[in-house]
Amino acid sequence: MTYRTVMPPDAKALLDGDGWAYLDVRTPEEYAAGHVPGAYNVPVFVRGPRGMSENPDFVRVVRAHFAPGTQLVVGCAMGGRSAQACEILSAQGYQGLANMQCGFSGTRDASGQVVPGWQGLGYAVEKAPAAGRSYAELAKRT
């Protein structure tokens, strides 16, 4: 494993500093409902007729916009898909990766207690993507 796992406050601190970008690997629909400000959306899984499946264009689209040396905070809804995305990107030579545990929406710990994610902690949320950061725009420019 060549990535680290961070909680939302640590992810926010990285993003508030210099040199980190946020890669939202949720579906475009989830992203459109609200996301970390300035996030780029490249889903690691996409919906199809048989449910969710791995996005065959994930690596190609990420590579087209981010060099392997780019420092990326990778997030999803709860932290599972982003961990998978970090595994995929690590295998492609990406090294500056931080998986945001608990994700945008939060999760539950082993005892069933809610562990808040980005949104639950009251951090800023955007609904409209910055120009050129939605999956449709990123995929089109590859």
Image (cartoon, rainbow, N blue to C red):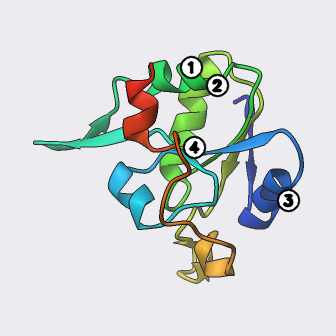
Whether residues under marks 1 and 4 lie with C-beta atoms below 8 angstroms apart, the answer is no
Q: Give the labeled residue for mark 3.
A: 13
How many other residues sit within 10 Å of disc 3, few (<14), some (14-19) or many (≥20)?
A: few
- Amino acid type indicated by mark 3: Ala
Looking at the rendered image, the disc whose residue lies closer to the viewer, 3 or 4, is: 3
- Residue 124 point in image, percent of width and height: 66, 72
Q: Who is closer to the viewer here, 25 or 85?
A: 25
Disc on the earlier residue, 1 or 4: 1
- Residue 48 point in image, percent of width and height: 17, 41
- Residue 66 point in image, percent of width and height: 64, 25
Whether residues under marks 2 and 1 lie with C-beta atoms below 8 angstroms apart, the answer is yes
Local secondary structure at mark 3: helix
- Amino acid type indicated by mark 4: Ala
Q: CA distance from mark 1 to mark 3?
A: 25 Å
Q: CA distance from mark 4 to mark 2?
A: 18 Å
Looking at the rendered image, the disc whose residue lies closer to the viewer, 1 or 4, is: 1
Local secondary structure at mark 2: loop
In the picture, which quadrant includes the C terminus? Answer: top left
- Amino acid type indicated by mark 2: Phe
Q: Identify the residue at image location x=46%, y=18%.
A: 60
Disc on the earlier residue, 3 or 4: 3
Q: CA distance from mark 3 to mark 2?
A: 21 Å
Q: Which residue extends farthest right?
A: 17
Q: Give the labeled residue for mark 1.
A: 63
How many other residues sit within 10 Å of disc 4, few (<14), some (14-19) or many (≥20)?
A: many
Disc on the earlier residue, 4 or 2: 2
- Residue 117 point in image, percent of width and height: 62, 70
Disc on the earlier residue, 1 or 3: 3
